[in-house]
């Protein structure tokens, strides 16, 4: 077992986090904490949001990077820094390096979205694309570090980084002192390690609950060990970490009550709900807290729940597709497939019926040659926007009285 896990000394103390708060105040945004009545009505809990998606880089990750880099000696700054990240931490290190005049190299997996690479480069960092995933990118980073003598700014497994992340919890308690529950996304463990330290020192009565996504649920068996980590693609890529940091784990393992696991569709629905109800753009990892609350309503009913929205860096296309997929699942968008006689006036009649019921036609696709079962028929695919699930059912029921139709 790791010496870190068997040590009795605290990884991070409240004083460390309070000092970090002073240290990074000039370069990191003190993000708003807001009550969200719309989410409270929806969930039955009293929901408070900590808006880390409003950081300069769109993520809480800059807090840890800022604290770590502010602690570097002049000699270490002169050597430059290096890190491995596929997104938010990369931007945090790059921005802080630009503010401090430090040369920064960021190793990112080869398949990192171009928008994240460009955003990191925009802060002046040298980006190296290497490896197919985080683990293989780490190998390249270690080679560069050994060759050039750079200082590693780890994405999560560093006491200074954990202390920086904990400053978000200090702000939360200052702005919302009456909360009784905090639901925190868990990837490498830096954020929940910081939150656990603060709550244990200042509000030990506050229950801390961690959330992981199914493919990366290394703590699914918590408090026992040995949760399965399947890996693979996830919309919550910000917490797609196969192995927690040992420093992080020791910072929170005895200070949280449970770990909840959410699936991809629950995260997608939470992203849509945050956009629609809270008017907040949130990436998958940041939406997992709300996903957990929505998936376990009885657990949170009547409680005063704080949700740190850990980041808002979601690709515009992914956001649009996520919202559309959620609307389809909710029934507010219908995709209906008709088999109709191939004669004039059919499309006009169908359109009129949909309009009479107040449906809004978004898209129409008309197939004659290959999709229809007979040369005398045509297949018509119509996408319709409805007010709600009941309205969608009314439209479909009326159309089914007159046409052969099925929902896709």
Image (cartoon, grey):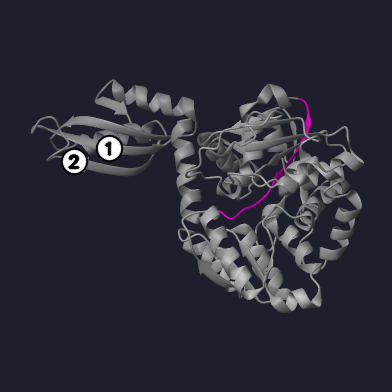
The quadrant of the picture occupied by the N terminus is: top right
The quadrant of the picture occupied by the C terminus is: top left
Return the mark for residue 367. 2
| SS at mark 2 in the image | strand
- The front one of 244 and 389 is 244
- The front one of 286 and 96 is 96
Asked whether, in this view, residue 407 is left or right of residue 234, the answer is left
Q: Position of residue 337 (x, y in %)?
A: 27, 32
Asked whether, in this view, residue 331 is left or right of residue 166, the answer is left
Q: Position of residue 265 (x, y in %)?
A: 51, 35
Where 284 falls versus 128 (above or below)? Answer: above
Q: Position of residue 170 (x, y in %)?
A: 85, 49
| SS at mark 1 in the image | strand
Numbered range of the magenta stretch: 302-314
User: Is 133 part of what is drawn in magenta?
Assistant: no
User: Is 304 part of what is drawn in magenta?
Assistant: yes
The disc, 2 or 1, on the residue closer to the chain's N-terminal end is 2
Return the mark for residue 381. 1
């Amino acid at each position: 077992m790791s010496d870190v896990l068997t040590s009795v000394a605290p990884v991070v103390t409240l004083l460390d986090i309070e000092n970090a708060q002073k240290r990074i105040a000039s370069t990191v945004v003190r993000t708003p904490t807001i009550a969200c009545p719309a989410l409270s009505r929806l969930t039955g809990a009293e929901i408070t949001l900590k808006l880390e998606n409003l950081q300069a880089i769109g993520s809480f990750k800059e807090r840890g990077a800022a604290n770590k880099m502010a602690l570097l000696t002049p000699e270490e700054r002169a050597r430059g820094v290096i890190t491995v990240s596929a997104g938010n931490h990369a931007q945090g290190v790059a921005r802080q390096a630009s503010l401090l005049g430090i040369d920064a190299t960021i190793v990112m997996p080869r398949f990192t979205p171009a928008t994240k690479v460009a955003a990191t480069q925009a802060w002046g960092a040298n980006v190296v694309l290497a490896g197919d995933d985080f683990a293989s990118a780490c190998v390249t980073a270690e080679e560069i570090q050994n060759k050039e003598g750079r200082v590693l700014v780890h994405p999560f497994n560093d006491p200074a980084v954990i202390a920086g992340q904990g400053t978000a919890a200090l702000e939360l308690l200052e702005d919302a002192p009456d909360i009784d529950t905090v639901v925190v996304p868990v990837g490498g463990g830096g954020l929940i390690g910081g939150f656990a330290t603060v709550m244990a020192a200042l509000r030990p009565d506050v229950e801390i609950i961690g959330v992981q996504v199914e493919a990366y649920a290394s703590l699914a068996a918590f408090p026992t060990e040995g949760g399965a980590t399947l890996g693979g693609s996830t919309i919550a890529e910000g917490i797609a970490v196969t192995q927690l940091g040992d420093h992080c784990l020791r910072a929170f393992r005895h200070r949280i009550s449970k770990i909840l696991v959410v699936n991809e569709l629950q995260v997608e629905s939470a992203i849509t709900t945050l956009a629609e109800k809270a008017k907040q753009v949130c990436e998958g990892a940041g939406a997992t807290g709300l996903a957990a609350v929505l998936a376990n309503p009885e657990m949170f009913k009547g409680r005063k729940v704080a949700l740190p929205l850990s980041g808002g860096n979601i690709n515009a296309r992914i956001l649009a597709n996520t919202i559309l997929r959620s609307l389809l699942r909710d029934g507010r968008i219908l995709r209906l497939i008709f088999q109709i006689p191939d004669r004039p006036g059919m499309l006009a009649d169908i359109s009129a019926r949909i309009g009479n019921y107040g449906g809004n036609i978004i898209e129409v696709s008309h197939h004659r040659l290959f999709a229809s079962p007979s040369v005398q028929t045509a297949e018509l695919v119509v996408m319709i926007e409805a007010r709600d699930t009941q309205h969608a059912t009314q439209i479909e029921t009326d159309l089914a009285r007159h046409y052969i139709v099925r929902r896709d």
